[in-house]
Each structure stands twice: as C-alpha cells, then as structure tokens.
Amino acid sequence: MKRLLLLVFCLCSTSFVFAIDNITLKLGSITGTGWQTKGVVVEWHWLKDNQVALKLNIATLILAQLKKPLENVILTCKQAQYDIKQMTCPLAELLIGGNLLDKPSINLSFSYYFKSQKIDFDLEELALAEGKIDLQAKSAPKGWQIQLNAHKIEFDKLLTQISQFINLPVSFNLAAHFSHLEIKVFGDSKVRHASIDGEATGLKFANIKETQVGENMALKIALKTDIIYFPAVSTQIKKSQQSLKQNKKYSVQGTLKINQGEVYIDPVYVEIKDKPISMMIDFVWQPTHLSIHHFAYTHTDVINLQGTGEFKIGEKWDINTLSVQIMQSSLKPFYTSYLQSVFDEDNQLSQLDISGAIKGKLNWHKNQHYVIAQLYDVNIEDSQKNFGLNGLRGKIQWHSTATDLPSHLHWEGAYLTPSLKLPGSQIRINFNAHRLKLLAPWYQPIFDGAIRIEQFEWKDLGKENQAWQLQGQLYPISLSKLSTALEWPPLSGQLSGQIPNVTYRNKHLKIGGKLGIHVFDGDIVLHSLSLNEPFGELPELRANIEVNELNLKTLTEAFEFGEIQGQLSGYVNQLFLVDWQPISFDAYFGTPKDDKMPHKISQKAINNLSNLGGSAAANAISKSVLRFFEHFYYQHIGWGCRLETYIVENGLEKKVCQMRGTGAASNGYYIIKGSLLPRIDIIGYEKSVNWNVLISRIQTVISATGSINAPVIK
Amino acid sequence: MQSLKIYLFFIIVFFCSACVTINVYFPAAAAEKAANKVIDNVWGKQELSTNKDLETTDAPSPEPEIEEVWGIPVDKSEPTPSSMNDSNESSAPESTSFLSHWLIYGLDFLIPPAYAEANLDISTPAIRKIEARLKNRHKKLLPGYNNGAIGITNDALITLRDSSEVPLKSRRQVNRWIADEKKDRLALYSEIAKANGHPEWKNQIQAIFANRWIERAKRGWWYQDKKGRWQRKR
C-alpha cells in the first residue's frame, strides 16, 4: 500500500508539469514477500483544487497465508485531497469479489503523510458473517497497530467464509453469536502484542468424537498476549525457519467468564445457570515449554481451584510439575454439579444426599505424585435412606512413592440398612502407589458385638493382578438383633468367631481356615470356602458346611415351621454354586447319634414335612383320631438331598435332587421314624425330585400339590 | 470284460460310499435360527405383517427415568418426523444372498446327518446372562432407536448415529449404554462360538447376527447398509 501511495504521490507531483488530466497505468504483476498481485491497473484523474480521483484494480491478489487468491479487488476514491504534507481520501470504496463478504462493497478512508510515511486507515461497517466490522489501522516506520471491532458476528458463518481462504483446524466445531468482539494487534517488523475482548451468546463447540461438547453458552472472554523475541542459541539452530520458531515466546493473560450454558467433558456434565464459572490464566508459551504461572477456576458457590504448572510440549506432552489446590468447598454443590453426572442413573452413588466440606491439594512432579484431601463433617446418605454415613472427618493422603504418610478417617455413625445402625468408628490406613494397608486394627461395633479387622492389605490396586488379604475376628453379635435389622426371620444365637485368613489373588477368593457361626445353640462351620471370579461374569463358589447340634426347638420357632424338639446335625458337602445358583451338593440333616434332648414333633411340623414331599395326605392327622394329640414322639428325623445338574434337550439344564431319609423303609425312606404311641412315621417314596419344584414347595410349604410318590404318614 | 467293468464300477461305488469324511462346516442356518431366537428374546418377539411392517408385540414399556434421560415423552411406535429429514430411504436391508440361502438349504437337504439338524447351543449360563442384560438395556435404548439417535451398524453392533437427538445432559449415559451394549454383543458372539466348541466361529456368528439384527429391526429404525450408508427401515 505504501509503495502504491508513493507512486500516486510521484504522479501528483509531476502532474503540473505535463498538465495531464488522466493517467492509466497497467502494472501487470507485482511481487513482494508473501504476496503477489496480477493484473494491477491504476487509474488517475485530476480534479480541481488539489483533488484527484483514483481507482486501483487488482485482478488477482495472492497472499501466502491464503489458500486461494482474492479476485477482483477494486479500490475507488472519487475525491482524494493532497498537498505537500499528506494525501487524504475521506470516502473510498473497496470491492472484493467472490463470497468472502456478505456485501462486497466496503466504505473506508485513508490518509498518507509523506514526510513521516505514516498511514491511517479506517474501514467502517464491513458486512461479514451477518455482522459488521469496523477496522482501524495505523502504520509508521516505527510500528503499526490494528484495531478491529466486530458486532453481531455469527462465528460459524465467519469460520465458513474464512475457511474458503484459510485451512482451519477440523478437530473442533465452533459456533457462536458474538455481540461484541474487539481485537487489537500491534508491532513493528514483527507482531508484538495482541488482545481480544469479546462477548458471545449461543456458543456451541464439539470435538469430532463429541466427548467435549458445549451448548447454549453465554460468555465473556478477555485475552492478551505479548510476543517476546530473544536470540536463539546458534548451535541449536540448523535451519533459518527453525530459528524463527525458537526465538519467540508468548506471554498470555486471559480471563473467561461463563454465565450460562451446558458443558460435557466426558464423563462430567455441568450445567451453568445462576452460578457463573470464572477462569483465569497467566502463562508463557515457548516452543518446547509451557509455564503456567497461575490459573484459577472458580465456579461460584461450588468450587474454587487454583494452581501452577510446568509442562514440556512438542510432539509429546509431559508434566514437569503441577500443583492444584482445591480451596475449602462445600461438598453438596460440588456433588450435584460435577460428581452426580459421572455415575449411571441406576447407580446408587448417583442418588446421594451429601453435606460437609472438602479441601485438597495435588502436587505432581516428574516421578513423585501426591494427593491430600481433608474432609470436614461430611454426611452421606442414599436418597432412599438405604445407607448412610454421618460425621465423617479426617485426612486422606496418597503418594506415589512415600510409604510413611498415614490417612485417618473418623465417623460418628453409619447405617447399612434403615435398621442396621452402627456406632462411630475410625480407621487408619496407608495408601501409596497401588497399595493400601491397614495401619492399626479396625474395630467396628455392631449391636452388642463387633467386627475387628486385624490385618488388611491390598496390593496392585486397580491392576489386573490385584490381590488382597485380611484377617480378623467377630466378637459375639446377637443374631436376634441382626436378623431383626436385616428383616430376616428372627434368629437366636450369636455370630462370632475368627475370620480366618481371607485372600484374593488371580480373581480367586479363598478362606484359609474355618468360619464359624454360633447359632440356635449349635454351630455352623464353613470350611474350604473359595470363590472364583467373585466380581466376574459368572462367580463360582465352592464350600463345605458342617451343622452341629442345632436346637430344633429354637430353629423351628424362628421359622414358624411347627415345633420340633431335639437336635439337628448335618452337612452340605461339595457345595458348588455358579452365579449364586446351586449346581451340585450333597446335603444331609438329621438327629445326631448322642442327642439327649426330648424328641417331640408337633402336628403342624408333621404336616409341613409331609407337604415338602408333595403329600396329598397332609391332612391325614386332622381327619383321624390323631388330631387329639398335640405332639408325637420320634426316634430319628433325617432328610438328605444330592443335587445334580444335567444338560437335557436344547442345552437346557435340569436339576434333580436325589432324596434320602434317616433309614430305608419299604419302597422308600424314613423322614421321621416315630417312637412310642401314638406312633407316626413319615416315609418318602419320591427318590428324585426336580430342584425347582422342591424350592417352590419349601417356599409355599402349606400349598404343595399332591404327588403319587409323596411321603405318607403311617 | 463287460462284466468286469460292471464289477469294478460297483466296487468303486461301494468304496466311495463306505469312505465318510466328516467336515465341520459353519452351520449358517442353525446360526440364523439361534440369532433370531436371541433377538426375539432381547427385543421382544416381532411379527412380520403383510406389508412388512414390523410391530413389537411384547416390547418392554419405558420407565419414567428412561424418559428423563431421553428428554422426551417416549414414543413407543413411530419415529419422530425430524429424524426422517436426511432419509435415504430404502426397503428391507440386504439379507444373505438368495443363492447362498438355497445353497445352504440344498446342502442341508442332501446331507441330512446330525449337524444339519443340530441347533446351536445358546443356553449356557454365560449366554443367558448376557441376553438378560441386553434385554434389560433394550428398554433404555428403545427411544433412541425410535428417534434415530441410535443406529444399527453393519457389524452387528450399534452406534450413536445422531447425537442431536440426545440431550447433552444424557450424552454420557447414552454413550455408556451404547458402549456396554457393544461389549455385551461382542461377548455374546464369542460365547455362542465357545459354547458350541468352535471359538473360531465368532466372526461368522457376528456376521449372521449383523444381518439378523437389521432384518428384525422395527419400522423407522436406522441401520447401516453394507456400504456403511445409513438407511431407514421401512
């Protein structure tokens, strides 16, 4: 432009000598650094009183930064004034062909000062992307500056129009209505400073995979950058182009305020309504290095993060140092604004009532990472009140290498079901790298007893080959209280004993010793218990169970089965469950040999036992003289089932229980062998029964249907 | 000499008929039957009417929380008009070619022994469990099939075809369902192959399913044809 104006000035200064009215110059092609013009025609027409009309016509303007040339660029100034100092065109018109602009005509004014070689350039109401742009440019030998003010610009349309000429990155889609956007750039032979101030509504963005999406956003942005040039180290430079890249850095300060909108950065969704988000950053960007001197993220009344960081950049990014601090924040708004959206809608963690506060810090150095979180009076409750924890406070620390940083949590109370309330407790752990270890035994009172975990260690946490191990003890817990709380049938006795060495390794859980429960005045002992892939698709359980001398009176009272007096012992051997469904076992329960207790059975119990076998003779007692007897005496009770699973037609499973009793009877087996008078025997004739049928009989013990082979009462 | 030739002929025929080579071919017809059975269980049995209008006869009813995820009152039968705009409509999808069908059926007829009549085992606990999960998830995905957000891909999986039909708030949830659905479907094909003693059949089973999912899709649902173009089921 300067060259062109100089040419015009030369022509002006010579016009008087030759008294020429019109000049037309056809310059053909002109080439400069980064630009080329073709078909340049300058038309010059003298008017009166130092006034000229001029027209510049460029058929093709090629700029290195544009992927296609601008065609038919025409600058017309109908009345330019000139004198010895300057030349001014207060009203010029610029026409640019193609579809770059909404309206191809642009009004502008310019002045050129001959002595100072200064140019002032004003462009008004450039119609672009459904909006208007005003542009002011000043240029002098010492430097230049450009100020652009855009109004009501549709950013997606602007990008579409610009993309005709410049290759824009395609990894992000962006659309917005900028009600106001101001861009200032100044420099000399190089760009020295740039700033942007803008306000947008309806902003949308999305990456290609749509894992980072924003919609309906209203925001204000302010960004300024100083570009600092410094000499490159010559030994490191091989190519001149490389030296250009390596000897400048950008010092950037920016703020962004989001007043409304929705943002989804997988997996977090945040809706911004009446609590705006403010972000601030101050960083220096160099070709191989990014230093964030300070950044802050403030979601009003929700969370406030602040930090610093040093990053290695280039082909591969790496964190040299990063420090992030969460200022003390209330957990409730943080949970509802950020965490809740992370969980599936059917996950109980997505429906929590949370209160309390959290404060935390992350320190990340190349090989050392450290996280600390402090909890203050945290209360967590499932919204359906199925479980909860209250008065939780303490400190959680994790370090990638240090092993001497304890974490300590204390809580005032908890409940696992609405009725299973637990008093307060505390836990001390060490959490480092992929290892979590109990530092002191954890003692949790439960009703009148407690559970005490002596040892717990979890190695390779989160890895494929993770393994853990625990040992502990159960101090007698009243089963009546526990069964009431869990809404089970009322049980008597106590739950107590050692929790033997429990290990989980290679997706296999194994209990090293025996696990005993003292219940109904007897004992139930589990041993050889192992679980294969307990958290997998099809968990498999194998175990042996021993039942020793349960008091039948308390047992039958608990289940309203009908009173039976005496003892019951038995076993479930080689129990095998797949997906918690029984596949096979061999079970037997009966009167132990040395049972000294009275052996009595009620009418109701007899009816129920016979109904379990599908007896049609269930009411035999009530229809006979026997109905006058409340109780009957027996020698032995016994019932066994060997469950086997067969694959039948179409690959379907059939489970069959091979039944047996306390002894052989004619064509059957005794379930109850009576004694004294009036004597009652219950004899089962059905030796094999479908497992599902048996289960339904147990479930509806009174309403069992008749069967030909049902037990009969004699 | 003539009688010698006759004897020789009979001897050759005898030996030929006595030599039995057992080849285990992929039982395509049985796989189709198994696929239909699985799909009917997962999607609910569909009835093919005379005008090829597929209607779900025992489709699961949507739940309020599912409506909340999709941000719409769930329409159970017809797709929304907006999802029809970019329609490149076509009739029923390409099915296994006519010739290959008849070849399979022809071979089945000519070679009647055991395998031709055999069904694929789809009743192992692992398969049943995956099926149950697919069936349960289908209730959640159904609005997405109906409004065109979800499309059935030509590799027997599904994808988020039109994200604008999913409220941003639910995008993560729907993406998660789709990811889980893909994982379960792949596990299903693998388990069927394993359950029948031929893990190497996995890809063939997946290819059969690809066709069957599309064939049994409901009217208005979107699917990918073999060239990867989206089509709307009519």
Image (spheres, rainbow, N blue to C red):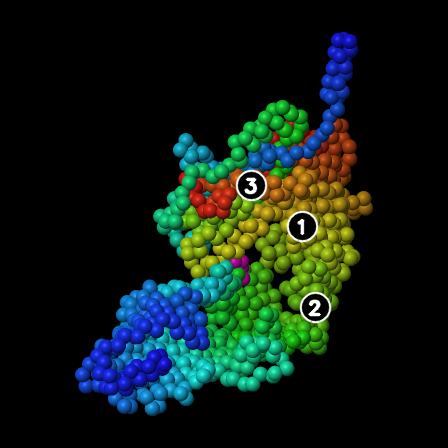
Tell me which chain the residue with mark 2 is part of: A
Number of other residues with Cα within 10 Å of mark 2, as a class: few under 14, some 14 to 19, many 20 or more: some
Mark 1 burial class by Cα count in 10 Å: few <14, some 14-19, many 20+: some
Q: Distance between the residues labelled 2 and 1?
A: 25 Å
Which amino acid type is marked by label 2? Arg
State whether residue B110 is above or below residue A117.
above
User: Residue at point 58% right, 43% down?
Assistant: B206
At numbered mark 2, what does the secondary structure look like: helix, strand or loop? strand
Q: Residue furthest front?
A: A18
Task: Tell me the kind of residue under disc 1.
Answer: Pro
List x then y, in percent, for residue A382. Answer: 52, 62
Viewer can see residue A113:
yes
Q: Which of marks 2 and 1 is nearer the N terminus?
A: 2
In the rendered structure, which amino acid carries the disc numbered 3?
Phe
Can you tell which quarter of the image residue A7 is in?
bottom left
Give whichever of B233, A530 is nearer the camera.
B233
x then y, percent, for residue B77: 40, 43
Name the residue at 42% across, 33% down: B49
Q: Which residue is drawn at 71% across and 30% down?
A: B22
As measured in the structure, the alpha-carbon distance from the residue carrying label 3 to the one carrying label 2 is 44 Å
- Residue A539, disc: 1
- Disc 3 target residue: B209
Q: Callout 1: helix, strand or loop?
A: loop
Q: Magenta stretch: residue A692 in it? A: no
The residue labelled by disc 2 is A435
Q: Do labels 1 and 3 share a chain?
A: no
Q: Is the magenta stretch mostly helix, strand or loop?
A: loop
Instruction: Report in which chain the residue with disc 3 lies.
Output: B
Q: Which mark is residue A195?
A: none
Which residue range is magenta in the image?
Answer: A344-349
Quadrant in which the C terminus of chain A is drawn: top right
Which numbered mark, 1 or 3, is in the foreground of this view? 3
